[in-house]
Amino acid sequence: MDIKDLTIRKFKDGLRNGDFSVREATEEYLKNIKENNPLLNVYLETFNERALEKAAESDKKIASKRDLGSLEGVPMAFKDNILIEGQIASSGSKILANYRAAYDATVTKKLEAEGVNILGRANMDEFAMGSSTENSAYGVTKNPWNLECVAGGSSGGSAAAVASNMALGALGSDTGGSIRLPASFCGVVGMKPTYGQVSRFGVMAMASSLDQVGPFAKTVEDAEMIYSALRGKDGRDSTSVDKDVEAINLSNPSDITIGLPKEYFVGGLDKETESAIQVTIDELKNKGFKFKEISLPHSKYALSVYYIIMFAEVSTNLERYDGIRYARDVEASNLFDLYMKTRGEGFGEETKRRALMGSFVLSAGHYDAYYTKAQKVRALIRKDFTEAFKEVDYIFSPTSPTTAFKIGERTDDAMKMYLSDILTMPVNLAGLPGIVVPVKGRDASMPVDFQLIAPHFHDRDLFALGKYYENL
Ligand code: GLN
């Protein structure tokens, strides 16, 4: 068995044909991890014993042909902010270095019920704050295509796990681009569902009005299989909904109009990205898809709005790490000292910056000028998309202005780092679904993914379009 060639689809076929057992496959993955993880820093921890036990359970089910899940035995990596009962969940932070999850996240329960085998917890920017995984307290994850480059962030470990065959699929979370950006930097498929499609219960909150969990995989079909297992209403997350709109029929591409937001194509795009994107547009045009320039006039405010709303929600969500709950072992002479030491030592630089900025934008004298205003502009950004979807069916763009950048290149300049997500964060502000798919047939050194955005709840259309492109 060569795990390099495997996809979830082929894995399922292989099991069905008896080509290998889940145990054999799991051992292959663990072997690859043992060899390559020290180089790439993808996993913070692997659950070898647990994974082999689960594999044996799956093999038993397969032998008896009973209770088989739709993802039986599929080896996956979970971002370190997703709770798995009994396992450490550190969210890439020192403050939670020893925190063990007391319960499963809903997504963990759902995927394990379908037979998924979680191999370990994947590296990430601390509390999902970053674009390069350089904010992890446990070291940077390297890009499997070029060890001098970042894997992207904040779900860098999850993306790199799939790209380096250390897992067949992975889960990440996306608040402003944290699934799509690393997927693009690592040349795999990544998808952020419509806000509400996937339960956030048991996923450590970053910015609650923006966070969604979603899949990474090698193919769009694989990503959809994971998505199908993830989605659905959950009584434990009141923002979750049950709305599964059937996928569009693509037998007549000429009936479909795809919008190209002019604001997303002006300046800043590197040559490699620009040409890869143009090739894809031409390919789709040849098949009959219509393309049309559109305008999302409030895009220019998206970054500022995101970085006010997100800061505000982050600072509120981080309040729980106070040294009493999720305790760390610190010597303190009084309560204030305990807070200071716990947070001073436990939080990284970027986390401190955001907690401070968030407290500032929410403070009595500044609340209206920043937070309330940002919420108003957020409504306008959302309206831009609603208007655009009256003219076009979907929206197409690059995922990021550049391919993966060098480790250290943006760490000294927060603004430069923040700009990495300029093309993904408006999608979160509007609560829309977005998928990123690797551009095919390039011989360039670093991968480029294009991004497709659909109206709310048309998540399945994105998979249909992605599969169409992959099969061209
Ligand atoms: N890079 C963005 C940020 O730093 C997005 C993070 C995310 O989606 N979790 O906030």
Image: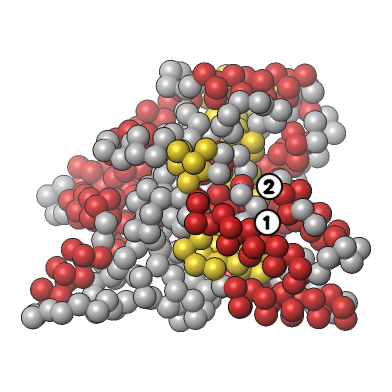
Label 2 sits on a secondary structure element that is: loop
Residue under label 1:
168
Q: Are marks 1 and 2 in contact (CB under 8 Å)?
A: yes
Q: Earlier in the sequence, mark 1 or mark 2?
A: 1
Toward the viewer: 298 or 112? 112
Name the residue located 41 percent from the left edge and 35 percent from the top edge.
406
Name the residue located 14 percent from the left edge and 68 percent from the top edge.
340
Mark 2 surroundings within 10 Å by alpha-carbon count, few (fewer than 14), some (14 through 19), many (20 or more) = many
Q: In the picture, which quadrant includes the C terminus?
A: top right
Rendering colour mode: secondary structure
Toward the viewer: 360 or 123? 123
Q: In the picture, which quadrant includes the N terminus?
A: bottom right
Q: Is residue 350 left or right of residue 3?
A: left
Q: Which mark is residue 155?
A: none
Q: Is 321 located above or below residue 135 in the figure?
A: below
Name the residue located 26 percent from the left edge and 61 percent from the top edge.
347
Q: Is residue 45 left or right of residue 220?
A: left
Residue under label 2:
218
Q: Position of residue 3 (x, y in %)?
A: 73, 54
Name the residue located 56 percent from the left edge and 72 percent from the top edge.
47
Tell me the distance, in whole angstroms, between the alpha carbons under discs 1 and 2. 7 Å
Q: Position of residue 238 (x, y in %)?
A: 49, 67
